[in-house]
């Protein structure tokens, strides 16, 4: 099977280049990650992040034939050859398919992705009703693979100022949480021309999310809450 | 590699006060020697090839259902792989995010884990949990209710008792699980 993979080692290369591989697949090779691991047995200098190999850890996000996705849940039979593989767009490349995720995680941490409850610690768990819990469906499943944010032109343009789809999805995940007591502070923080309103509903995030989540919907809900509290 | 973890540890120790024991001189030498061995290894056997051999040996000789002759052969097979692990190498010598080097270091760990598993399984003459011996079908709490300890030097085995006294709940006598 034919692959064209973007390579870059800052110690050796002045700029990134493409390397072609033609590697016979084994009988158990189903997913793109299987193929990449097989390529690595031929050329151990190819660097990529991977861990759980089943779409849970979010490590092996990359640009596959022009679309962001997880190599481990992308079927080889669905891919046109040569399979062109590049690192996630818009973030600095450290090496080969590995990008520097600092900007992405800085934005994620900036939304305080944890329950804020000003009161004293309760003796037991903070309980939720099933109806309250269901509000978090479609939000809590995010694995922070960065497929969405690195497919977003607004994030490419302002990764230091725009929270991006992953960060905003997680912001809404805590706004929607019945246990959280800081909704107003969260909305104050997001009411900003850059942090929230750089989202122009391009919806690339929805298109690529490997978990089938809808960051644009979550962002719309945040905007709705801002309007509601203003009128 | 491990840079981020190392930096976090340094930060943690700085902010929590250094309450750790004094390290002996040259405490990090063994770790650095492993990396230096890899960097200096010329014409080493592919890590992926040796890893595959270990995996195949474990699969064939040390699955859930274990046979005495296969276990004895398995111990020999795993021992014989030791030299190949020690001579394995990587072509990637880069200092930047070198995942080939990580996999080579993991191979050392994988090998020791495999060897410990195989040697302990061969020695344990009973059936317990996922260790199902064809020649000793029953669980034997009289002789084998104990942890196996494996030492690299000469595949020496030692045993230590199982702690049967939980801290916060009533303890009950161990017995076979029957389904």
Image (cartoon, rainbow, N blue to C red):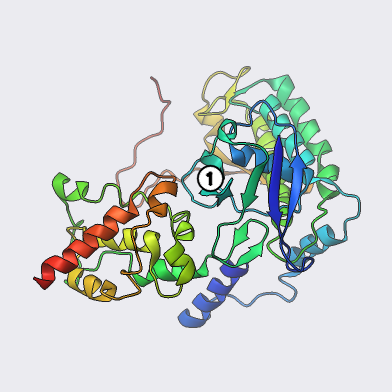
- Which residue is located at x 87 percent, y 49 percent? B44
Q: B12 or B79: nearer the eye?
A: B12
| Residue B116 in view of the camera | no
For disc 1, the chain is A
| Quadrant showing the N terminus of chain A | top right
Secondary element under disc 1, as helix, strand or loop, is loop
| Quadrant showing the C terminus of chain A | bottom left
- Which residue is located at x 44 percent, y 48 percent? A208
> Relative to residue A24, is residue B86 depicted above or below?
below
Q: A110 or B168: nearer the eye?
A: A110
Expressed as whole percent of the image width and height from the top left, the position of residue B66 reads 63, 23
Expressed as whole percent of the image width and height from the top left, the position of residue A179 reads 18, 60
Q: Quadrant of residue B35?
A: bottom right
Q: Quadrant of residue A144?
A: bottom left
> Relative to residue A118, is residue B83 depicted above or below?
above
Q: B123 or B14: nearer the eye?
A: B14
Along the horizontal axis of the image, is B127 left or right of A203? right
Along the horizontal axis of the image, is A139 left or right of A144? left
Expressed as whole percent of the image width and height from the top left, the position of residue A216 reads 32, 55
| Residue A102 in view of the camera | yes
Along the horizontal axis of the image, is B148 left or right of B72? left
Q: B92 or B80: nearer the eye?
A: B92
Crowdedness of circle 1 by 10 Å Cα count: few (<14), some, many (20+)? few
Which residue position is annotated with label 1?
Answer: A52
Along the horizontal axis of the image, is B101 left or right of A111? right
């Amino acid at each position: 099977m034919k692959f064209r993979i973007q390579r870059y080692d800052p110690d050796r290369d002045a700029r990134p280049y493409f390397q072609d591989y033609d590697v016979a697949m084994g009988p158990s090779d189903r997913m793109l990650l299987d193929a990449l691991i097989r390529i690595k047995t031929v050329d151990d200098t190819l660097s990529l992040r991977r861990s759980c190999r089943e779409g849970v850890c979010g490590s092996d996000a990359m640009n596959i034939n022009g679309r962001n996705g997880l190599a481990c849940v992308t079927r080889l039979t669905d891919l046109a050859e040569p399979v062109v593989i590049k690192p996630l767009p818009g973030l600095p490349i450290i090496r080969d398919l590995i990008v520097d995720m600092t900007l992405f995680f800085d934005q994620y941490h900036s939304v305080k992705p944890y329950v804020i409850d000003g009161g004293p610690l309760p003796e037991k768990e903070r309980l939720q009703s099933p109806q309250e819990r269901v509000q978090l469906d479609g939000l809590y499943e995010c694995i922070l693979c960065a497929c969405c944010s690195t497919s977003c032109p607004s994030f490419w343009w302002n990764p230091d100022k725009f929270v991006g789809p992953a960060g905003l999805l997680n912001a809404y995940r805590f706004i929607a949480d019945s246990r959280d007591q800081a909704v107003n502070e969260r909305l104050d923080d997001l009411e900003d021309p850059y942090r929230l309103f750089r989202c122009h509903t391009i919806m690339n995030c929805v298109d690529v999310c490997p978990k089938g989540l809808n960051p644009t919907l979550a962002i719309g809900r945040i905007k709705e809450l801002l309007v509601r509290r203003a009128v | 590699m491990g840079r981020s973890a190392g930096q976090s540890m340094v930060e943690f120790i700085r902010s929590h006060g250094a309450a750790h024991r004094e390290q002996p001189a040259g405490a990090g030498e063994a770790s650095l020697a492993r990396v230096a061995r890899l960097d200096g290894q010329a014409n080493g056997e592919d890590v992926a090839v040796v890893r595959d051999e270990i995996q195949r040996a474990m699969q064939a000789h040390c699955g859930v259902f274990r046979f005495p002759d296969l276990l004895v052969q398995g111990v020999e097979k795993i021992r014989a792989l030791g030299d190949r692990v020690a001579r394995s190498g990587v072509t990637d010598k880069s200092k930047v995010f070198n995942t080939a080097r990580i996999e080579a270091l993991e191979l050392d760990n994988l090998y020791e884990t495999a060897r410990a598993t195989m040697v302990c399984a061969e020695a344990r003459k009973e059936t317990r949990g996922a260790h199902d011996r064809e020649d000793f079908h029953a669980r034997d709490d009289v002789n084998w209710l104990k942890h196996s300890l494996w030492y690299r030097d000469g595949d020496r085995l030692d045993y230590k008792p199982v702690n049967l006294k939980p801290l916060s709940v009533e303890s009950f006598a161990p017995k076979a699980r029957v389904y």
